[in-house]
Image (spheres, helix red, strand yellow):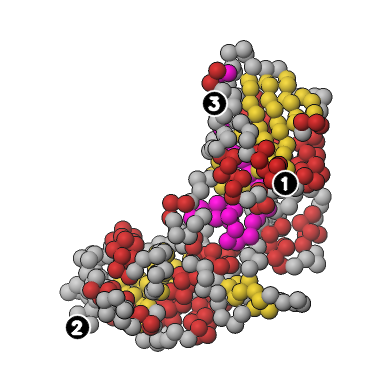
Amino acid sequence: MRSDAEFKAILGPYGSGKSVGCCVEILRRCIQQVKSQDGFRYSRWVVVRNVRQQLKDTTLKTWFQWIKPGVLGFWKETDSTFYLHFNDVKAEILFRALDTPEDVQKVLSLEITGCWLNECQFIPREIIEGLQGRLKRYPSKEMGGSNYWMMMADTNPPAMDSYWYKIFEHVPIDEADPNSVVDCDTFKQPSGLSPEADNLENLAEGYYEKLALGKSKVFVDASVHALYPPSQSGKPVYHATFRRERHVSKVSLPINPHLPVIVGQDFGLTPAGLWMQMQEDGRIFVLRETPAFDMGTKRYIRSRFRPMQMTIFPTNPIVVIGDPSGVRRADSDEGTSFKEFKDAGYIAKPAATNDPEVRIKALDELFSMYPDGEPAILIDPACKSFIGAMASSYRYARKRQAFGEEYSEKPDKSHPCSHLVEGGQYGAMFLTGRKYDPADYTVYDDQFNPLATHNPYRPAQKEGY
């Protein structure tokens, strides 16, 4: 409620008070609306649910529970509209479903002050973008205008890779367009079993404990712990070992300015690099990512790789460990991806193998290890695409069958962010192999202390390399 963002959204577990909060927020904003010339506060809201029956059975019942007809206004069934009319407030709250194309067209023809998208994970992108164009249309300037415009949404956790997942995680809606991140102020409620859980005082005792009994892990994760369920398109490759709550840091990870940074690099026209660093205690930090789309190696180095190195890792030795297929010459200029990196001044080596089983196992073992109770690998929250790929989009595709479930034997590489995971596999193989020694890539001064700076265009390397 403190957020005045034009677009804001909240996700949480069952029973956490999201819908009630949205009802009260509409009422509050109607009361705060600027007065028109005739002394009244006018506004018009639309409340959207994807199915008419759910609109009646859940959304409307919640509204009537808190804003009762006959107290602050009245309900008109023929208009599916609640008219707020008390003191100096005159507001229309239109309740609309999206069952038919005609329903959708009616919603997209409204002139409104604000809207509430109830259980928004089931409302498609076209509706959201269309409604954003209908805001700022009521009240008109002749009526005195408005002092705010607002789109508000609530939901249980949406599936990974979905449109709403990308909104909540602030990743590009269209992978090839980094400017397609939706400007939305997002809020995530804690698990219902967390000490910080919302709304426990208004739920039956043991509500979440009983809700979890006998349910699948996917159901419990989403409905109780407010975690994103996996995509229904297939089975995540690392579903057994990767845990977002354990392996993704809640704060930015520190970067040691002296130790080498290993960039696991995948090539092709969707090049992707995962920037990793082994700490002095042997743990591996995944620090940054450089995904790219529809570009060759040379442009990738110029527009993505080098800017990342110069701004985030200006003093670190950089070592590129790439897909062994990158040693093959390109048909166009007889160059190779490794040669492009070396010509740009970077140490670049092919990974030991491109065998999928070996690569997958390298990361799998890291995510399953907990030395001294801490995860052996930790991911910076800035690596949003890599996190999403690990959790869902790097997966074994589901085979169509009449009975049961069966998945392909090799990971599906159709999702662009899968290349980040494969880059991470190359980096993991190198960092956990016997041949890696940080001293081989660190510059020292006369007192054998690691240097803090070096030419960012020429990554440090041991003399005689």
Disc 1 marks a residue whose amino acid type is Thr
- Left/right placement of residue 353 relative to residue 156 reads left
Question: Residue 333's x, y, as percent?
Answer: 26, 76
Using a 10 Å C-alpha cutoff, classify the residue at mark 2 as few (fewer than 14 neighbours), some (14 to 19) or many (20 or more).
few
Which labelled disc corresponds to residue 464? 2
Please tell me whether mark 2 sits on a helix, a strand or a loop.
Answer: loop
Decide: is 132 above or below 200: above
Please tell me whether mark 1 sits on a helix, a strand or a loop.
Answer: loop
- Left/right placement of residue 240 relative to residue 179 reads right
Q: Is residue 299 visible?
A: yes
Disc 2 marks a residue whose amino acid type is Gly
Q: Look at mark 1 in the image and give the residue it sits on.
A: 100
Sequence-wise first label, 3 or 1: 1
Quarter where residue 323 is shown: bottom left
Q: Residue furthest front?
A: 102
Residues drawn in magenta: 143-172
Query: Gap between marks 2 and 3, in whole Å?
Result: 67 Å
Using a 10 Å C-alpha cutoff, classify the residue at mark 3 as few (fewer than 14 neighbours), some (14 to 19) or many (20 or more).
few
Q: Are marks 3 and 1 in contact (CB under 8 Å)?
A: no
- Foreground mark, 2 or 1, reads 1
Q: Is residue 56 magenta?
A: no
